[in-house]
Image: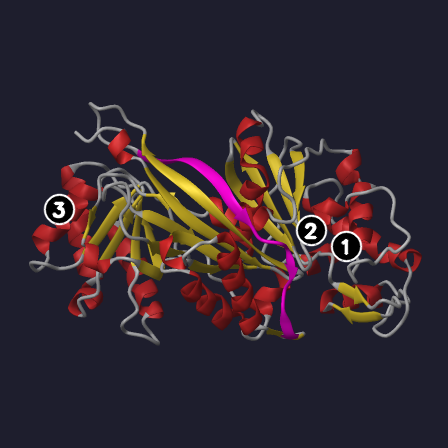
Amino acid sequence: MIGVEAMTETLQTVGIDIGTSTTSLILAELTITNTANTFTLPHIAISQKRLIYRSPVVFTPLLSASTIDEHGIQEFVTAQYEKAGVDKRHLKMGAVIMTGETARKNNADRVVHALSDAAGDFVCATVGPSLESVLAGKGADQALLQRAGSNDVINLDIGGGTSNLARFHDGQCVDTACFDIGGRLIRVDTAHHVTYIAPKIKNLIEETQLNIREGGQVTAETLRPLIRKMVTVLEASVGAIKAPRWVNDFVTDHALQPFHKRPLLTFSGGVADCLNDTLPDDAFPYGDIGLLLGQGIKQSRLFADFRVVPTTETIQATVVGAGSQSMMVSGSTITYDYEALPIKNVPVIAVEGNWQWEHCTAVATQQLRMLQESDTQQNVCWALNGITPSFEAVGNWCEWLITVARPLIDRRLPLIVMIKENVAQVMGNGLRSRLPRGYPIVCFDNVPAITGDYVDIGEPVASGRTLPVVVKTLVFQ
């Protein structure tokens, strides 16, 4: 049996956050260790996470209001790698996350995927408010989430374009939400003339008949009624008040599910650095309403009615989460063909172990047909959740997989299977015995996923005993 010392390995990872207002990068070192004793099967886990480099926070480079400066972003990343003395070939994992209004730019899809390829051999691209909410919450203060005890924690990550909420229970995210509320939804020049108003804010201004318009001059006082409306959205988002009907206009994907016990609140994002009762002489030092929004939040029921706990990260919470919290490791009883790895951006088709076989087949067949409509070479990852860990049950699932995956097998695409239960090696062996000799298989366990997720799988680590995995959502709005 390989001892614990032989099973310890360190990986360098990168996190890159391209947000509405700002862009930043962090480098982290993850330690992967066998936490089992000598007489049991290996149990591989990420035992330590350490930040080794932080970039400065810069304004996100744009060519226009609707186009990201792809060259400017890549120059920034290259310069930070040089400052940190890092060779991108040594970065085993990482994530580029595009957030807020930036994810809606015309070239967002191309930029984030081009950057993920340029940033390292296995740096995944991801966009989506749900994942951003989770990464920001964990990046803000993972230790706090774990020591909160019986208290739920809601982290509000308030950036330039959106506010991402994540509710945690026992350190695990149980719900997310996103609202179009942020500090750069109105921008002003040095003379305090309005240069930009986001569409939803413009509608709110018209409905409330406020005298705020592009080209007009504003003061902190003229903006306060609007700031109060924006804060109302956040108060309603955590149940501090009953939500007025118009608040629904600011829901990006969905609101939080109702909860009964009042949670602790934490704040991250750029606006979290602006939670002050007073304003400086110039209320617009960043050319936006971030300071005003921060003051409005500080004086709201979010602080009056809830216990607010400070966090270790604010403006860089999402990028810290992307670099140090996005990766999981599979179980150690796995089956894989090395030449099939790494795997990037493979869509997940998930089925549940308690479904009838006919329902499993109907769902899987429909999903596969949709995914292959425009590309018959599109591979998928089959996620099996809640299957019975017996030889008979695993054998039945092997037969089912080979039947529904026949279009992929006929094209000799690798058969990729992820299982929630610890049976991947048994299933991998069962699939090998039923497939042509040498057919490529990647089968791993202890990683949950649902239909609509995408999965990235890296090359084996920890002496080949485990696979690094990122489960994510790719949503360009």
Instruction: Examine the rendered structure and indicate whether residue 205 appears above or below residue 106.
Output: above
Tell me if I can see residue 127 in this picture. no
Residue 366 at what x, y percent from top left?
A: 32, 65
Say which residue appears at 32% left-offset and 75% top-offset. 375
Please report contact status of discs 1 and 2: CB closer than 8 Å, yes or no.
Answer: yes
Say which residue appears at 8% left-offset and 51% top-offset. 433
Instruction: Examine the rendered structure and indicate whether residue 256 appears above or below residue 64.
Output: above
Whole-Å distance between the Cαs marked 1 and 3? Answer: 56 Å
Q: Which is nearer the eye, 384 or 140?
A: 140
Residue 309 at what x, y percent from top left?
A: 68, 33
Left or right of residue 463, residue 470 in this image: right
Q: Earlier in the sequence, mark 3 or mark 2?
A: 2
Secondary structure of the magenta portion, mostly? strand
Amino acid marked by disc 1: Gly
- Badge 3 density bin: few <14, some 14–19, many ≥20, Cα 10 Å: some
Q: Could you tell me which secondary element the residue under label 1 belongs to?
A: helix
Whole-Å distance between the Cαs marked 1 and 2? Answer: 8 Å
Residue 105 at what x, y percent from top left?
A: 59, 71
- Quadrant assignment for the N terminus: top left
Amino acid marked by disc 3: Asn
**Residue tagged by mark 1?**
290
Q: Which residues are magenta?
A: 44-63
Say which residue appears at 27% left-offset and 30% top-offset. 5
**Residue tagged by mark 2?**
270
Q: Could you tell me which secondary element the residue under label 2 belongs to?
A: helix
Amino acid marked by disc 2: Gly
**Residue tagged by mark 3?**
429
Q: Is residue 61 magenta?
A: yes
